[in-house]
Image: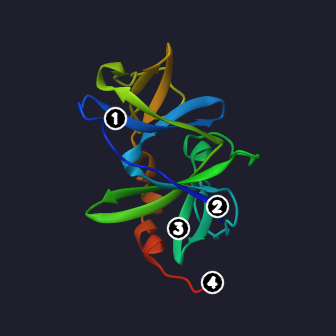
Amino acid sequence: MKHMQTQTQVSASGDSAQYLTFMLGGEAFAIGIMAVKEIIEFSGITEVPMMPDCIRGVINLRGAVVPVMDLAARFGRPLAVPGKRTCIVIVETESDGERQVTGVVVDAVSAVLDIAASEIEPAPSFGTRIRGDFIAGMGKLNGKFVILLNVDHVLALDALATLPELAGSETSAA
């Protein structure tokens, strides 16, 4: 399985941070690079019965069972239709002191960009097509907005309470 390692860093001046930008349903989104472990091709997802609609299934990532979330479905949209550039972004978050690794399906990864703190606006209180608590802010890039996601809120779903157990499981299948 092909994968690309990402680097995590904040600029020396500390007034900007790096974000991984990606496309989903024709819209630009970004997540803080510190949460990104790696990016892999979209393949090898095993469906798991009785999971919420936004969970595509699980993948075997070097022996670890990692749940894969479809961000489009999480945002209340139809499931993403895989294309040539569709990939899975492996994200690590912490919830209640436990490390949680989750894959998220995106249409295409764009770039890693520095966004200055002065170029980040608060999340709008209305007019977005996703829940307000999912948005950390709106990054301004070249006159356009990129939706900065709050990964902890996007991945915090009561129906996904078993994710830390799933992500910690070892599998002997290759």
Eyeballing the image, is 62 above or below 75?
A: below
Left or right: residue 170 compared with residue 133: right
Mark 4 and mark 1 in contact (Cβ < 8 Å)? no
Q: Is residue 166 visible?
A: yes
Eyeballing the image, is 142 above or below 63?
A: above
Q: Which residue is mark 1?
A: 17
Task: Return the disc, 2 or 3, that comes first in the chain's sequence.
Answer: 2
**Element type at mark 1:** strand
Q: Residue at x 48, y 36 (%)?
A: 30
Q: Between marks 1 and 3, how big is the CA–CA gap?
A: 27 Å
Q: Which residue is mark 3?
A: 66
Disc nearest the viewer among 2 and 4: 2
Q: Which label belongs to residue 8? A: none
Left or right: residue 71 compared with residue 33: right
Q: Residue at x 34, y 64 (%)?
A: 99
Q: Between marks 2 and 3, how big is the CA–CA gap?
A: 16 Å
In percent of width and height, residue 89 lies at 54, 52
Q: Which residue is mark 4?
A: 173
Task: Return the disc, 3 or 4, that comes first in the chain's sequence.
Answer: 3
Callout 2: 10 Å neighbours few (<14), some, many (20+)?
Answer: few
Eyeballing the image, is 52 above or below 60?
A: above
In front of the other: 83 or 115 = 115
Amino acid type, mark 3:
Val
Amino acid type, mark 1:
Ala
Callout 3: 10 Å neighbours few (<14), some, many (20+)?
Answer: many
Locate residue 2: give its quadrant: bottom right
**Element type at mark 2:** loop
Mark 3 and mark 1 in contact (Cβ < 8 Å)? no
Disc nearest the viewer among 1 and 3: 1
Q: Residue at x 55, y 40 (%)?
A: 75
Q: Which label belongs to residue 2? A: 2
